[in-house]
Image (cartoon, rainbow, N blue to C red):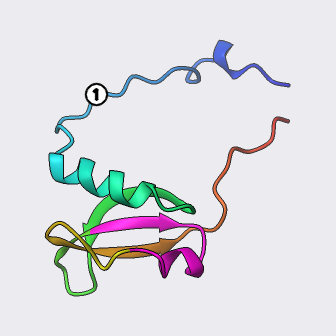
Amino acid sequence: MVDYTSMPGFGPVTYSPKEAVTPERQKAEAVLRRIAGVHGVGEGRDSIGNPAWIAYVQDSSVAELLPKRVGDRDVVPLITGEVGARPAE
């Protein structure tokens, strides 16, 4: 197995977001992440350009379980398939 932590450019990454996570985003994540098969939540736009919550889901059966809206935004499913770590080499 390769130890990438000793290589330049690999290892811990500092994350310093320029914007705080809003209470609305926290609520959307809490609601959507409770659904099995939701791998992540992001902010984006619906098909006509309105702000929306993007739910990254495993498959269409998970997409069908999503609420239509959370707060004042529509929920848009994006099917990603299985998400997981790559096996060690």
The x and y percentages for residue 55 are 41, 66
As drawn, 11 above or below 74: above
Residues shaded magenta: 53-66
Q: Is residue 33 left or right of residue 43?
A: right
- Of 34 and 81, which appears nearest the observer? 34
Q: Secondary structure at mark 1?
A: loop
Q: Is residue 68 left or right of residue 33?
A: left
Q: Amino acid at mark 1?
A: Ser
The x and y percentages for residue 4 are 69, 22
The residue shown at (63%, 68%) is 81
Specify the quadrant that holds the N terminus.
top right
The x and y percentages for residue 61 are 58, 80
- How many C-alpha atoms fall within 10 Å of the one at disc 1: few (<14), some, or many (≥20)? few
Mark 1 highlights which residue? 16
Return the residue found at the far top: 6
Residue 6 is one of the magenta-drawn residues: no
- Of 51 and 14, which appears nearest the observer? 51
Residue 54 is one of the magenta-drawn residues: yes
The residue shown at (21%, 87%) is 48
Q: Is residue 29 left or right of residue 64?
A: left
